[in-house]
Amino acid sequence: MTNTNKAKMIIDKSFKIAEIDRRIYGSFIEQLGRAVYGGIYEPSHATADEDGFRQDVIELVKELQVPIIRYPGGNMLSAYNWEDGIGPKESRPRRLELAWRSLETNEVGTDEFAAWAKKVNAEVMMAVNLGTRGIDAARNLVEYCNHPGGTYWSDLRKEHGYGDPHGIKVWCLGNEMDGPWQIGMKTAYEYGRLAAETAKAMKLADPSLELVSCGSSGSGMATFPQWEAETLEHTYEYADYISLHQYYGNRDNDTANYLASTLDMDNFIKTVTATCDYMKAKKRSKKTMNLSFDEWNVWFHSNDQDKKVDPWSFAPALLEDIYTFEDALLVGSMLNTLLKHSDRVKMACMAQLVNVIAPIMTETGGGIWKQPIFYPYYYTSVYGRGTALHSIVDSPKYDSKDFTDVPYLDQAVVFNEENEELVIFAVNRHLENQLLTEVDIRSFEDYQLVEHVILENDDLKAQNSINDQKVKPHTRSKSFIENGNLTAVLPKASWNMVRLKKRKES
Ligand code: AHR
């Protein structure tokens, strides 16, 4: 027998949070493991195009409709010389890549990545090294990428075969500079000063840039949120966003507690927002600092295996988490959390995209497959466009090891006015009971149920592989609309997308 819990929601067109910035569905490719070599780039692969990029990967990335992709790191950024990755491939240096202790051949660099991003219809979110380098390297890279021509660096780009500027708008000022693991780690004062001066020079080279100041590497850092307060003291007037990074993992095999992790993510976003607004008040500034959640995902499955990988190998299998069904539930909730904060979170990157903690996996020389986390990412990216709506929710709750008052119903609502579509993304966190959710859709007259996509599995630890898609969505739902209201039946432990559309007048 199926046990049932009940929840209620009220949705109204006028309960607007914000227009969703499409860039919240961004992702990340770091020169790490098999993300680039054997992932997006493999000239000997059967599907490789004339530039050596795997077209099977290009197709899946396009399917996800990823609007922006962060590059080249990540931890590797902090000792990276971008000049190593330009010009004739045969003269590019092979280097010890210190962050992941691998061999970097530099076959792929700035120009190749910008060309690949075009193929997948994405913008590049470029990052500059503020670990071992600084103002000079950063301003030269801006000139190389964005200046039309007639100067040393822009003419060099042209000589390399890239006549048109890459036109990269969004730039990260370093990566996780608060982290002791980071090469060239800095104190908040050291980072704040360097980031501000670097930003100043970069904006002189190209005033249209949008810059991201480094926030904490995670909500668990001892220096959070003092790091934000102290660095913003210097970067507030030069940067446009502050970054947030967060990974979760079910390390204790406590699924109820794990699925509640988004309460921490929610609190993280609120604290960073409050810190930004404090700085705005302190500085009597008219500018509002927005948030770039440019690394988020589940990351823990591969931790032990990675310790056994031999150093200095080329494209080793690193951070190759094989995700489970329950990870997909959490990823769905993380996307909901981003949507519910779309008034301040304007960019976000699922970290990462291919092979490295990724929704897309490839075999070097072989096929391609979708991890369970692919599905909530795909549906939210494709259908979560328009206006995020606040909804009034009445849900039963539970307490877990680290959290209290965790609603079983986790949700986000999007109204796509242009397509006349109302989309509800929901996770039922209850591991045994289905959740019968009565939804009052008062201002959406004549809206009909188009589809209810469900991701469910009796085995929370179910995984996919190249031969077997055990975790994939279906549309066999018991949801219905009656008297203008929706009853959404959310199976136990499930991720759901309920899509409604206005009836066409005949
Ligand atoms: O995405 C994997 C790593 O996580 C990145 O290199 C780093 O920025 C973060 O710690």
Image (cartoon, rainbow, N blue to C red):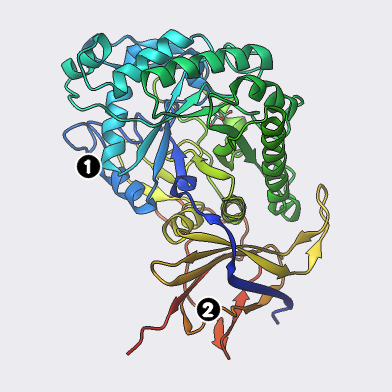
- Which residue corresponds to mark 1? 47
**Which x, y percent locates residue 482?**
57, 89
Mark 2 vs mark 1, foreground winner is 2
The residue shown at (58%, 38%) is 291
Q: Is residue 269 above or below residue 173?
A: below
Quarter holding the N terminus?
bottom right
Q: Position of residue 303 (x, y in %)?
A: 61, 32
Q: Is residue 406 visible?
A: yes
Where, by quadrant of the figure, is residue 432 drawn? bottom right
Q: Residue drawn at (72%, 78%), measured in percent from left and top?
A: 4
Q: Left or right: where does residue 82 sit relative to residue 470?
A: left
Q: Residue at x 39, y 10 (%)?
A: 95
Q: Earlier in the sequence, mark 2 or mark 1?
A: 1
Q: Is residue 500 left or right of residue 168?
A: right
- Quarter of the image for residue 224 reads top right
Left or right: residue 184 versus residue 219 is left
Q: Which residue is under mark 2?
A: 444
Distance CA(mark 2)–CA(mark 1): 46 Å
Q: Quadrant of the C terminus?
A: bottom left
The kind of residue on which mark 1 rests is: Thr
**Which SS class for mark 1?**
loop
In this view, 124 is above or below 488: above
Residue at position x 47%, y 49% in the image = 21
Q: Seen in the image, is 501 located left or right of residue 485?
A: left
Tell me the kind of residue under disc 2. Answer: Phe
Local crowd at mark 2 within 10 Å, few (<14), some, or many (≥20)?
many
